[in-house]
Amino acid sequence: ETGVTQTPRHLVMGMTNKKSLKCEQHLGHNAMYWYKQSAKKPLELMFVYSLEERVENNSVPSRFSPECPNSSHLFLHLHTLQPEDSALYLCASSQEPGPGQTEAFFGQGTRLTVV
Amino acid sequence: AQKVTQAQTEISVVEKEDVTLDCVYETRDTTYYLFWYKQPPSGELVFLIRRNSFDEQNEISGRYSWNFQKSTSSFNFTITASQVVDSAVYFCALSEAYNNRKLIWGLGTSLAVNP
């Protein structure tokens, strides 16, 4: 059983819809991440939150809007997506700061299909 | 530039065979961290190992072993006496000390262990 829970597991949305992905971690970590996993591409880091502050935004289009209301919850708000945004969206958490990269714990992902 | 190459896209073995998954990395940094993650069909990435660049000792954990060779910039992963439950996609990743929140991922190797 994972300490990082993502809902929903599957989502189909139209290009004009607005939806949100939710992530919750039960590990007491202070950093949370959103990743995008597409076929035949390396995992793409989208956003990083540390102590509830966004510390990285890797040139992600504004149609993706993250929110971190507290250290245990992370949301990804979606609006006017494109078909190429269809992918597996993974949430992760880790403990930082640390002397080096500590291991991240991942959720099972939300499989998003944009039609 | 930082890069992780997993040249083997797919590997298929029969149960009880040994299998080695290759990982070659590129970095200009002298301090860095290497990781292996497993992604079973359920979707979540499961942490397997983290190794820092100053520790070239090989590691064994049960049926898993890792061979880190700085001379060839490789961090290979061997599963001994493979089992059907080892079927998954395995990812190698690199983190540099100056930006230890960002993991640079390989494309993954899909391992199928057949009964």
Image: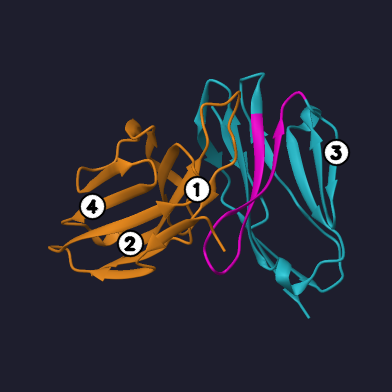
Q: For the residues marked 4 and 3, what is the alpha-carbon distance in whole angstroms? A: 43 Å
Task: Count residues near mark 1 (Cα–Cα under 10 Å), then give few for <14, some for 14-19, many for 20+.
Answer: some
Label 1 and label 2 in one chain = yes
Chain for numbered disc 3: B
- The residue beneath circle 2 is A86
Q: Chain of mark 1?
A: A
Q: Is residue A33 left or right of residue A84?
A: right
Q: List x then y, in percent, for residue A97.
A: 51, 26
Instruction: Look at chain A in the picture and name its colour.
Output: orange
Q: Which numbered disc, 3 or 1, marks the residue closer to the eye?
A: 3
Residue range highlighted in magenta: B33-54
Label 2 and label 4 in one chain = yes
- The chain carrying label 2 is A
- Three-letter code for the amino acid on which mark 2 is drawn: Ser
Mark 1, secondary structure of its residue: loop
Q: Position of residue A100 (x, y in %)?
A: 60, 27
The residues tagged by marks 4 and 1 sit, at their Cα atoms, a distance apart of 23 Å
Q: CA distance from mark 2 to mark 4?
A: 14 Å
